[in-house]
Amino acid sequence: MAHRPIYLDHNATTPVDERVLAAMMPFFTEHFGNPSSLHAYGWEAEAAVKQARATLAQAIGATPEEIIFTSGATEADNLAIKGVAEAYFAHGKHIITVQTEHSAVLDPCQYLETLGFEVTYLPVDDQGLIRLDELEAAFRPETILVSVMAANNEIGVLQPLAEIGQCCRDREVLFHTDAAQAMGKILLDVEAMQIDLLSFTAHKLYGPKGIGALYVRRRAPRVQLAAQLHGGGQERGLRSGTLYPPQIVGFAKAVELGLALMAAETKRLAELRQRLWQQLSQLDQVYLNGHPSQRLPNNLNVSFADVDGQALLLGLRSVAALSSGSACSSARTAPSHVLKAMGRSDDLAYASLRFGLGRTTTPAEIDRVAAAVVETVQSLRSLKV
Ligand SMILES: Cc1ncc(COP(=O)(O)O)c(C=O)c1O
Ligand code: FES
């Protein structure tokens, strides 16, 4: 097999775990029924979907009726934000979010601005965290929704969900969180954290691409939501379209595994990340992006001064599959909006690498990549003088 670079881009996506694939397989062939059909084939598929829904609900402290399947976190974010905007505009047209959110949150907010909504984009501090006093100051009588991500996809920073949930509940404002990166990596509890809507996705957690879910609170205070896809009325009318049992079964299996392995993986990945950072920080003028400890265990984001970002990625291409910023924005020419919001200069934002460690990452891989990064940075710097 042709030599492939070491995969260190697990914040972009992950491979499907063999155990997840095995759980999915029967639902492509033997158990191919449509869960909506009222016969044995349909019931079989329906039973599997029901079980998966219960597993997913339990993983976040929700009830099964509160889980709406979608095609991923992008669709879940859109449904949450546009669905709340459409259901609550009579109460007010103001939304609060954060400058460092994923485009699946920022773009729906910008779209709503074209429809007359007002959006506050909270700043973050130099470690990527929002400040609660700034959140508190942003509320208005007409605020209907706060959307703050659980874990950032570029820098892995974990926002204080329970505190944000409390702020929102005190003011009777709905709280949505995009937990695409956080699911299965940190504990999420929608009761304890007072979360009203939560988006998640399977493919960041060794599950298949193209499946995700939105948790929508039905217990008090119950969330009203306007559907964004209309048709056959699946998912209690909130998301029409034939359910996809293989993906749904795989999603639940991935989450179940993620939770079972979480404690051990958190420890192992944090050690590997530390090993990587120790080697990289032997270079002069390297900067860790994001809070040093309040972050996902598998993410390290680093900026290198006096290096051309594009040349750095090119120089490492054969050794490691990495990205600069997020998967989508690496293809763009603008510097990362997340690093810019933290106050990084354009140069440092360009010359950044996101290391996303995963379940198969080994110490030998880390050492190999670290050595290649050190060597590439040194040689690019020596060319400059
Ligand atoms: C924070 C965050 N939100 C949303 C998404 C989009 O998820 P999906 O690919 O499931 O639509 C991603 C994935 O890149 C993400 O990292
Ligand atoms: S969708 Fe997450 S990086 Fe592009």
Image (spheres, grey):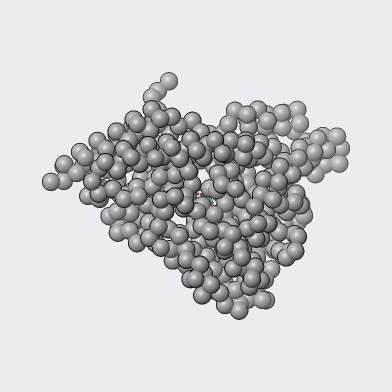
Of all residues, the one furthest to the right in this rendering is: 39
Residue 7 position by quadrant: top left
| Residue 344 percent location from the top left of the image | 33, 58
Query: In the image, is residue 65 above or below residue 94?
Result: above
Query: In the image, is residue 226 above or below residue 284?
Result: below
| Residue 36 percent location from the top left of the image | 80, 44
Can you say which quadrant of the picture contains the N terminus?
top left
Residue at the image position 45 percent from the left and 32 percent from the top: 361
Q: Is residue 133 visible?
A: yes
Q: Is residue 235 visible?
A: no
373 and 194: which is toward the camera: 194
Q: Is residue 306 left or right of residue 248?
A: left
Residue at the image position 80 percent from the left and 38 percent from the top: 47
Residue at the image position 69 percent from the left and 50 percent from the top: 61
Q: Is residue 332 left or right of residue 175?
A: left
Residue at the image position 40 percent from the left and 53 percent from the top: 290
Query: In the image, is residue 221 above or below residue 32?
Result: below
Residue 56 position by quadrant: top right
Query: In the image, is residue 175 above or below residue 381?
Result: below
| Residue 343 percent location from the top left of the image | 34, 62
262 and 204: which is toward the camera: 262
| Residue 194 percent location from the top left of the image | 65, 60
Of all residues, the one furthest to the left in this rendering is: 385
Q: Is residue 161 left or right of residue 324?
A: right
